[in-house]
Image (cartoon, helix red, strand yellow):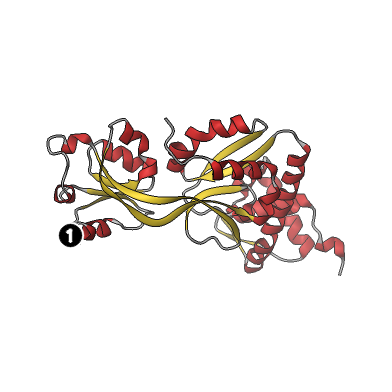
Amino acid sequence: MNYRRLTPSMSLLLAFEAAARHESYTRAAQELSLTQSAVSRQVQALEAQLGIALFRREGRNIVLTDVGRLYLRELAPALAQIRNATLQAVAYGSEVGTLRLALLPTFGSKWLLPRLNRFYAANPGVQVHIHSRIQAVDFAAGDIDAAISVGSEWPDLVVHPLLDEAMVVVASPAIFASDLPASATAIAEQTLLQVASHPPLWGAWFIRHGLDPARMRGGPSFELTSHLIQAVRAGIGVGLVPRLLVEDELRQGQLLSFGETIASQRTYCLVYPQRNAVLPSLDAFRRWVLDEPRTPVE
């Protein structure tokens, strides 16, 4: 077997990987700062070198063949490893380190960003680039170094628990201004709001307070916790939200909380692949965030 055939050039591999990931030459070209025709030619050159068809045409779209999908599955981690090796070399060779950190949007704006100036004060040579992610992070793509997310299982990742999630009922002061403190029955009569990705805890709240869950008046759900908080402030209904994400609103009197918190069985964790543990920027961030006080920032 000709080893040259088995080791295509990096330009051909990058063009294929981007086109395969997007199943689009146009989007791959935008990502790689090339023309669509250049990406198409590079993919065709790779197919000619391998002697296999990696894509097939379906109308105006391109779709991976079975062997193309297999090739992508094996190739993507290898390219990610090369990117990370290069990143590590650059980080060690530069006085300024960078960390690409994925965050849940509301957690980032409500908890991390108000504290981040303290990290910069202690680590002036590190820059943290924030990426919002609602879904689980795919570290194989190589564009994220670490993430702070919620969950209980992250196979093959290094996991550092940060905060247990505790939910609290919140409402606009306008709803209960004439009836404070509000009773569980009064709360149960309101429209109940929740975040779609959170466990359905309103039923547990009803049972805890001796109420029939069948009486629940389910309202709209929200993709982002920040949107739910705004809906509660607007008086659309009452919400069951992580307390750590509404500390500002509670302290400023924009929202009222009722009753004890309910554990959601989820924990905010710093997670990353083992290969990224050697990054100086990640090591600095890990040490800081694990020592950062959990009390609200004034």
Quadrant showing the N terminus = bottom right
Q: Provide residue 143's location: percent of width, then percent of height.
A: 63, 47
Q: Which residue is mark 1?
A: 210
Place residue 81 in its image quadrant.
bottom right
Residue drawn at the location 70% of the way across and 60% of the way down: 75
Is residue 43 shown to the viewer in this render? no
Q: Provide residue 232's location: percent of width, then percent of height.
A: 27, 40
Q: Secondary structure at mark 1?
A: loop
Q: Provide residue 48's location: percent of width, then percent of height.
A: 77, 61
Position of 149 with respect to 27 (left or right) is left
Q: Nearer the viewer, residue 118 or 47?
A: 118
Q: Which residue in the rendered view is the most extreme toward the left?
A: 178
Quadrant showing the C terminus = top left
Is residue 244 shown to the viewer in this render? yes
Residue drawn at the location 55% of the way across and 45% of the way down: 290
Residue drawn at the location 69% of the way across and 43% of the way down: 280
Q: Provide residue 167's location: percent of width, then percent of height.
A: 34, 50
